[in-house]
Image: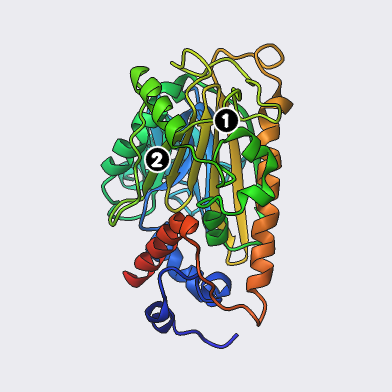
């Protein structure tokens, strides 16, 4: 590939049009994105229900880094690089597990859950253990959602907490349980996955199940009166309804909107899939849709949460993680059937995955040129503008 001029590409960018081909296919662009986006902003890692007890941990891999997310002795969440401070060995070798202490498998240095070096066997008497604690990663939580920052100077987290927190709070994520986690590998640039989930222009033709569940998703129905009526009901229940848009300097989007009348949940048959989650008294809380750039999506109904975490593997490959959460008291086989719970988003996700891969295949063609976004793709424009702004600040 000929060497690209990123500054020229950025200066040529026209808001309202898709990006030029190298933004989706050139490793040079992704290398800049690692610095200006993925290592500069708060990144969604997972949720506290994945690590319910002290010592529970999971690994989140970003580029060449593996991050340990572990529950501490007092319930707090810690994040560390999975790199021993002795000679650099990986410490946690499994994707998830439980550890009373973090013990390096190479020379058995022992670290506490908060990263403190407890024992460095056979080192000199004057060895200062305090200088060799695990290297920390900035971590924040909001209502059970875990975000990390790989920046040496992380941005203020409060806008994310204030935007997403009120919508997530009724779900009581800290008291919930993980029903299922599935990972998918897509042959598509990560931005195409993000773009796909920022518009419903494609929904009418690609997502019959989704359109059967959500009124207005086909973009042919007027939902103004129903939304106003439902907002009044939801506000009386104390549920957040105020639309949050991504504006300059912010990364969060939040919305609540109604299901189709008669539909109780995100399910293939429109029926509820589990007991109401957290503080929800019934199955009438509509849909909560949350986004946090660059990698977090959440679509949730009264009886379950579905989250999506996207992570670039390389310029042409993206890891997509789906996670389903249910109420902590819900029992599989009694209160919910796992297949019924996951079917809706497995079907919709497969449809979206194919669309993203098709999109990438076409963009790779020599015939590809940026095309105009339609008025209903305004949220895609918002996302792409945001990405370009981050690259311009590199």
Q: Which mark is residue 22?
A: none
Mark with earlier residue (2, 1): 2
Residue at image point 68% right, 51% down: 205
Location of residue 80 in the rendering, given as x and y in whole percent from the top left corner = 43, 44
Query: Residue 28, relative to residue 334: is it above or below?
Result: below
In-image side of 343 versus 201 (left or right) = right
- Is residue 74 among what the camera can see? no
Q: Quadrant for the C terminus, please.
A: bottom left
Q: Which residue is mark 2?
A: 254
Q: Which residue is mark 1?
A: 260
In-image side of 333 versus 385 (left or right) = right
- Residue count near mark 1 (Cα–Cα under 10 Å), binned few <14, some 14–19, many ≥20: some
- Residue count near mark 2 (Cα–Cα under 10 Å), binned few <14, some 14–19, many ≥20: many
Which picture quadrant has residue 146? top left
Residue at image point 48% right, 54% down: 87
Which picture quadrant has residue 178? top right
Confirm or deny contact between disc 2 and disc 1 (CB under 8 A). no
Foreground label between 2 and 1: 1
> In the depicted view, which residue is nearer to us: 140 or 67?
140
Q: CA distance from mark 2 to mark 1?
A: 19 Å
Q: Quadrant for the N terminus, please.
A: bottom right
Residue at image point 26% right, 47% down: 156
Query: Residue 340, relative to residue 193: is it above or below?
Result: above
> In the depicted view, which residue is nearer to us: 303 or 317?
303
> In the depicted view, which residue is nearer to us: 255 or 276?
255
Query: Callout 2: helix, strand or loop?
Result: strand
Query: Residue 165, relative to residue 139: is it above or below?
Result: above
Location of residue 98 in the rendering, given as x and y in whole percent from the top left corner = 56, 29
């Amino acid at each position: 590939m000929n060497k690209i001029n990123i500054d020229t590409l950025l200066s040529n960018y026209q808001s309202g049009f898709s990006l030029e081909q190298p933004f989706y296919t050139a490793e040079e662009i992704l290398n800049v994105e690692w610095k200006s986006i993925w290592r500069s902003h708060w990144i969604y890692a997972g949720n506290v229900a994945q690590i319910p007890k002290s010592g529970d941990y999971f690994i989140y891999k970003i580029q060449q880094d593996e991050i340990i997310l572990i529950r501490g002795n007092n319930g707090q969440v810690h994040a560390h690089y999975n790199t021993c401070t002795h000679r650099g060995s990986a410490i946690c070798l499994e994707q998830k597990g439980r550890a009373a202490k973090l013990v390096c498998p190479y020379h058995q240095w022992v670290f506490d859950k908060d990263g403190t070096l407890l024992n460095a066997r056979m080192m000199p008497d004057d060895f200062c253990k305090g200088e060799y604690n695990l290297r920390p990663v900035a971590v924040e939580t909001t209502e059970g959602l875990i975000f990390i920052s790989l920046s040496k100077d992380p941005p203020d987290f409060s806008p994310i907490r204030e935007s997403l927190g009120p919508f997530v709070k009724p779900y009581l994520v800290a008291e919930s349980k993980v029903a299922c986690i599935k990972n998918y590998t897509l042959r598509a640039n990560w931005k195409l996955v993000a773009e796909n989930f920022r518009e419903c222009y494609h929904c009418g033709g690609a997502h019959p199940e989704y359109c059967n569940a959500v009124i207005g998703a086909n973009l042919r129905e007027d939902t103004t009166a129903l939304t106003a009526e439902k907002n009044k009901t939801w506000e009386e229940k104390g549920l957040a309804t105020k639309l949050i848009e991504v504006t300059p300097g912010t990364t969060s989007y939040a919305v609540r909107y109604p299901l189709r009348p008669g539909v109780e949940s995100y399910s293939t048959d429109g029926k509820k899939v589990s007991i109401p989650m957290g503080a929800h008294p019934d199955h009438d809380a509509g849909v909560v849709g949350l986004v946090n750039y660059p990698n977090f999506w959440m679509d949730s109904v009264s009886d379950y949460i579905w989250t999506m975490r996207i992570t670039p593997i390389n310029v042409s490959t993206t890891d997509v993680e789906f996670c389903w959460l249910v109420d902590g008291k819900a029992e599989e086989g009694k209160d919910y059937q796992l297949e019924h719970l996951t079917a809706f988003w497995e079907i919709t996700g497969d449809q979206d995955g194919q669309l993203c891969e098709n999109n990438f295949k076409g963009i790779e063609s020599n015939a590809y040129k940026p095309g105009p976004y339609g008025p209903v793709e305004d949220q895609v424009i918002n996302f792409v503008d945001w990405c370009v702004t981050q690259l311009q600040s590199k």
